[in-house]
Image: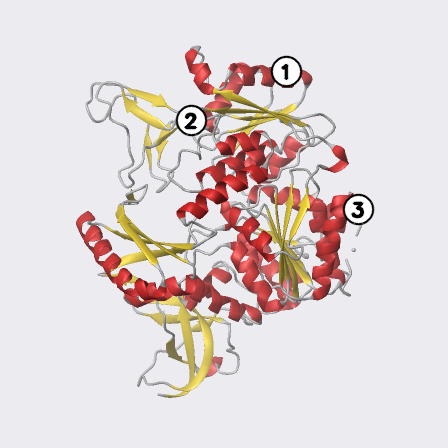
């Protein structure tokens, strides 16, 4: 067929484009990078227009139904970024493009109408001449901050791609350097992306930008309304706003003249995307920076082993350090509570040790604030029959159901199935269920029992479902309406509450006991970050950590605020076992409704992969049963590829898999650099 023809790719695991006839009314308006609605099989799908061609080998073509966007949503270097995503993370180009554009984004026909839709989403970043509208005086920098900022400024002046790691203890003033780096990039007439690991931190980040720049950025994350998202997209694409703050999806924002990308708390696992493409914001940031000549600034008190290793190997000032807190404030004292001693003395009726209870009592009496961490939601982790011993498990997933007291339900935290809680065992119909293990809901209940007059709040996924819940909780703690805050790991990530003097970790062993080679790193990160919430104001801080493993190197290093001791032990273990950062990993997961079929396919796939891996210096491990062998009704088997080159491993995979990313008819999930 001849005539104006559109090549379109879809959000499907297919490595090819599809041809469609362009109807007469769209021939003058369709451009590369626009989304279109087109028939695909029995339904219509949204795809991306790659290019227009004049010939197709197909005789009769279906026609594009309509254009979704008035202007292209993919332009400039983001085309090359999508192609890199497809190559590195073993996904199709359509899947990569779809990840870069929010599915609910609906642009207005007239870009100028964005100003009428909503004022500059959180304000305009510049005065129109590339110079930031600064209100508050910036604090004076310490000697360590001045040395670090001199390197940052030099890297921005070079206008070439460079990655720096800012390793600063909690409360050392990393955020101030972020703000100054953004201001410097804006003065150069360039744009900046500031990534944070949790939506819960967004209110704090916005407030700090407003203090300095008066509404100097747009906000970008999954809780932003579609109306605000449309306005933000238009402002960024037109260059009327040059700073975006948000979670990992903000990495794909359509900023112009990108000069700086900041990843705050770069070690956090939430920067890794769990859906296709399973990309990591840090790697995406570095790839986009290479395309634009931008600088990447990674910051953390507990850098990931991979980032710290890379920074030390790069040399040339790639590693910046802030070893002291601002204004000479001391790091908090950390006390380790051996919970085995609590058991010996018969004091396990409460999940809170006697010493932690005393510390909480003293804090409440002084009118201070305290934060308690338990990285488990719900009230109890297991409901077990006292007579037959049966554990209530999810029917679709091979995991125990979690008891939630507020709703009186048992819930699966993987497929979100729920069932009413009944005390009588459904298996034997004789015994009664007993609840084991604690979650944040139980800790909150225990705090109410111990301190009935205290103001207590809980922050976890259950209490932050509403759109403004993060802001409400943040404001309540910041204004001291809440004295005791209990939560999951989201409360450990970067909050700066100056009146918090006590931090308690209810169980330091939650992550430590997972079958994961990163268990030690995650434990050290969480304990160190959580400890850093204490003593950030005028009063000294205290940290109480409860554990059954007080001599583990991650816990000992966290007690001493000693990243270098932890890093040395962790790196030695990984070198010995050939684990990242010395190799890359790719996890390959097959899943299906028949266990026998999944096992047979996994065994055959392993054989095929080994034949192709031998000549590319790639190791294939497995197949093996994953930690959760059945998820959402599907049985699973996994394989693991190890090698120095991701490109080589992806090539081995592509050669073995069938179209549609399947093997023997079963879907295959690929996770490059899995966490």
Of badges 2 and 3, nearer the viewer stands: 3
Residue hosting label 3: 138
Residue 592, relative to residue 535: is it above or below? Answer: below
- Label 3 sits on a secondary structure element that is loop
Residue hosting label 1: 362
CB within 8 Å, label 1 to label 3: no
Of badges 1 and 2, nearer the viewer stands: 1
Residue 342, relative to residue 648: is it above or below? Answer: above
Mark 2 or mark 3, earlier in chain: 3
For this view, does 59 lie left or right of residue 563?
A: left
- Label 1 sits on a secondary structure element that is helix
Count up the numbered dots. Answer: 3
Residue 167 sits in quarter? top right
CB within 8 Å, label 2 to label 3: no
For this view, does 142 lie left or right of residue 613?
A: right
Given residues 71 and 553, the one toward you in this image is 553
- Picture disc at residue 379: 2
Mark 1 or mark 3, earlier in chain: 3
- Picture disc at residue 407: none
Residue 185 sits in quarter? bottom right
For this view, does 317 lie left or right of residue 102?
A: right
């Amino acid at each position: 067929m001849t005539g104006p023809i559109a090549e379109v790719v879809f959000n499907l695991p297919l490595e090819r484009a599809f041809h469609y006839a362009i109807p007469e009314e769209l021939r003058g308006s369709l451009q590369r990078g626009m989304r279109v609605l087109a028939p695909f099989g029995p339904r219509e799908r949204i795809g991306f227009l790659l290019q227009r061609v004049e010939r197709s080998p197909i005789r009769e073509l279906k026609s594009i139904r309509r254009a979704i966007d008035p202007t292209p949503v993919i332009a400039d270097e983001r085309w090359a970024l999508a192609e890199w995503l497809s190559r590195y993370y073993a996904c199709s180009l359509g899947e990569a493009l779809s990840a870069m554009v929010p599915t609910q984004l609906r642009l207005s026909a007239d870009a100028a109408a964005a100003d009428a839709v909503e004022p500059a989403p959180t304000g305009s970043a510049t005065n129109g001449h590339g110079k930031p509208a600064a209100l508050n005086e910036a604090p004076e920098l310490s000697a360590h901050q001045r040395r670090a900022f001199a390197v940052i400024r030099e890297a921005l002046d070079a206008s070439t791609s460079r990655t720096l790691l800012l390793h600063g203890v909690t409360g050392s003033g990393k955020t101030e350097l972020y703000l100054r780096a953004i201001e410097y990039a804006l003065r150069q007439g360039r744009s900046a992306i500031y990534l944070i690991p949790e939506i819960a931190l967004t209110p704090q980040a916005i407030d700090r930008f407003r203090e300095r720049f008066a509404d100097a950025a747009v906000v970008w994350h999954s809780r932003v309304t579609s109306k605000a998202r449309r306005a933000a997209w238009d402002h960024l694409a037109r260059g009327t706003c040059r700073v975006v703050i948000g979670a990992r999806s903000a990495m794909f924002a359509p900023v112009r003249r990108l000069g700086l990308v900041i990843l705050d708390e770069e070690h956090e696992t939430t920067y890794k995307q769990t859906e296709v493409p399973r990309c990591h914001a840090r790697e995406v940031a570095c790839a986009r920076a290479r395309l634009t000549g931008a600088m990447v600034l990674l910051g953390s008190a507990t850098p990931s082993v991979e980032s710290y290793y890379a920074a030390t190997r790069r040399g040339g000032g790639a590693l910046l350090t802030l070893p002291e807190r601002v204004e000479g404030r001391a790091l908090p004292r950390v006390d380790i509570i051996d919970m085995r001693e609590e058991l010996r003395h018969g004091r396990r009726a409460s999940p809170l040790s006697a010493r932690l209870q005393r510390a909480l009592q003293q804090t409440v009496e002084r009118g201070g604030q305290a934060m308690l961490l338990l990285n488990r939601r719900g009230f109890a982790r297991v409901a077990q029959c006292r007579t037959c011993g049966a554990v209530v498990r999810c029917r679709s997933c091979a995991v125990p159901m979690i008891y939630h007291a507020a709703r009186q339900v048992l819930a699966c935290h993987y497929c979100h199935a729920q069932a009413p809680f009944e005390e009588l065992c459904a298996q034997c119909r004789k015994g009664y269920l007993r609840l084991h293990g604690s979650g944040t809901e139980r800790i909150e209940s225990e705090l109410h029992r111990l301190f009935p007059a205290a103001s207590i709040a809980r922050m976890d996924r259950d209490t932050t479902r509403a759109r403004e819940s993060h802001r409400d909780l943040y404001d309540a703690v910041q204004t001291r309406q809440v004295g005791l805050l209990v939560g999951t790991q989201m409360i450990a990530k970067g909050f700066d509450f100056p009146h918090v003097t006590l931090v308690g970790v209810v169980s330091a062993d939650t992550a430590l006991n997972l079958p994961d080679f990163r268990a030690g790193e995650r434990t050290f990160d969480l304990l160190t970050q959580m400890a850093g919430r204490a003593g950030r104001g005028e009063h000294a801080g205290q940290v109480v950590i409860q554990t059954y493993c007080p001599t583990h190197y991650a816990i000992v290093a966290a007690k001493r605020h000693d990243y270098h001791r932890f890093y040395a032990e962790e790196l030695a273990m990984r070198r010995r076992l050939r684990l990242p950062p010395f190799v890359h990993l790719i996890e390959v997961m097959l899943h299906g409704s028949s266990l026998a079929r999944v096992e047979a396919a996994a065994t055959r796939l392993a054989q095929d992969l080994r034949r192709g891996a031998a000549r590319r210096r790639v190791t294939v491990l497995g197949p093996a049963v994953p930690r959760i062998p059945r998820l959402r009704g599907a049985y699973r088997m996994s394989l693991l590829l190890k090698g120095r080159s991701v490109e080589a491993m992806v090539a081995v995979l592509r050669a073995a898999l069938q179209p549609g990313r399947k093997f023997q008819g079963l879907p295959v999930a690929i996770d490059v650099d899995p966490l």
